[in-house]
Image: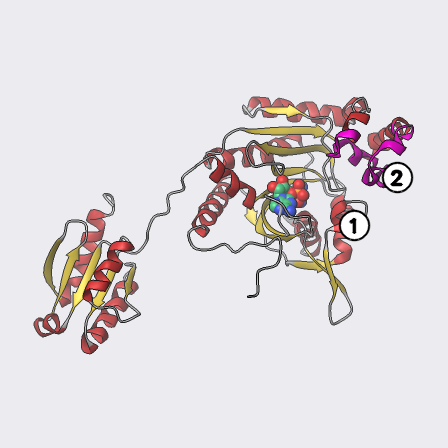
Amino acid sequence: MIKRPKGTQDIIPGVIEKWHFIEEQIKKICSEFGYQEIRTPIFEYTELFQRGVGESTDIVNKEMYTFWDKGNRSITLRPEGTASVCRAYVENKLHGSPKPLKLYYLGPMFRYENTQAGRYRQFHQFGCEVLGSDDPLVDAEVISLVWELFRRLSLKYLEVHINSVGCQTCRAEYRKLLQVFLEERRNKLCRDCQSRFERNPMRILDCKNTNCQSLTTDAPTTLQNLCEECQEHFNRVLALLTASNIPYKINPRMVRGLDYYQKTAFEIMAEGIGAQSAICGGGRYDRLVEEIGGPSTPGIGFAVGIERIIALLENQNTNIATTKEIKVLVAAIGENPKIEGFKLLTQLRQCGISALMDLTGRGLKGQMKYADREKIRYVLILGDDELAEDVVTVKDMILGEQEKIPMDSIIKYMRNEIDKTSCSD
Ligand code: HAM
């Protein structure tokens, strides 16, 4: 048997309802906060991610699904959404729209990662990106949007970790300081960190290797070396989070795995879903749009892993109500009743009443059982007797009662019944 590729998932009925519920909440909250949806291609020219996400990152170095297409162009399945949104912003000249532009997206991303619980090769992100404002209010707004989403999903035991990774000016100085500190410890670092020393020394600070962690306990942090502007920005963001009652923890060692961040960087961590505890990651990227060829435009955003939300909902036993939609089963017995039944089914559907008909040739008993199992309240029985009398027998599966209704008033009758009982279902 051919199996699905490693690191991918089938989202099957019974699970998909959770996805729908989460997606509905996302769309609702984004609309309430004034964010508009954007959909960008699943694949892009590789150069976009090399320039956008950064040559020195693990994503670009090790994790991209890259191939040559038939026209000899290097193509990559998107590993994240921010670079694509910025490209679309420039390409569609969205910088002409009133500022800031507040966008959101939902969709699959691809990273060739070592798979484990919560870490997939195809996974799904909900992300927001705000372009055109460097005001700390936007930093606070995006964090409060995702915090409110998690509140509505009843997720518990979450913590916002926040840091400032500085800007071009203060980070250049900081990098030198850090390299001086690391120089004498360099040979003791893990192999990955040794190669990070030149490429991306800040990443050494959030290496998961315990030896690297103890070697860098006293390393200087960006927070101790912020320029005045970055410090002021960070203070304002914290004040706004406090004002909106969002608990946060300053984490000076949190360095995000993408190169484009400046100033604010944050993650939301969850208890109870194992090692992959970040359910959201984001930050400010004030130079990214320019780096990919657009006008100088500040930006900030985040992305949430939908699989990790689902894992968390399951871990916290949060029940998601999956309401059954189907109200009516048309149970037709015999060849002519089936034609009349199909006509009735079509009319019910045209009137917006959710209805099914048996498609496998079950007898009346089998159809009753089916309605019972699927929790369909009304069965409309149509046999030769009903046809002769020009009626339909309506059986209410909850009350166990049945009555004959003239064919020409059945739609009106069903609509009344459904309106009457929909609150008590
Ligand atoms: P990221 O931290 O790489 O950031 O990913 C954001 C979230 O996506 C993570 O917190 C996690 O929940 C989920 N995620 C990432 N990789 C995987 C995986 N292999 N399997 C399952 N879930 C995963 C970004 O992607 C940035 N583009 C976020 C951003 C938007 N920054 C600014 N704007």
The total of numbered circles placed on residues is 2
Residue 216: image quadrant is top right
The residue drawn where x is 46% and y is 55% is 12
Name the image quarter holding the N terminus.
Answer: bottom right
Q: Position of residue 118 (x, y in %)?
A: 59, 43
In the image, residue 376 sits, relative to residue 310, either above or below, namely below
Give, as a three-letter code, the residue at label 1: Asn
Query: Which residue does the numbered mark 1 point to in the structure image?
Result: 61
Q: Give whichever of 172, 331 is nearer the camera.
A: 331
- Mark 1 falls on what kind of element? helix
In the image, residue 248 sits, relative to residue 412, either above or below, namely above
Residue farthest toward the left in the current orientation of the protein:
389
Residue farthest toward the front in the current orientation of the protein:
1
Measure how far apart labels 1 and 2 are at the Cα level: 15 Å
* Magenta portion: prevailing SS class: helix
Left or right relative to 38: residue 212: right
Left or right relative to 353: residue 150: right
Give, as a three-letter code, the residue at label 2: Glu
Query: Which residue does the numbered mark 2 point to in the structure image?
Result: 198
> Dot 1, crowdedness within 10 Å: few (<14), some or many (≥20)?
few
Residue 199: image quadrant is top right
Q: Earlier in the sequence, mark 1 or mark 2?
A: 1
The region drawn magenta spans 182-211
Q: Position of residue 7 (x, y in %)?
A: 62, 52
Q: Position of residue 209 (x, y in %)?
A: 75, 33
Residue 415: image quadrant is bottom left
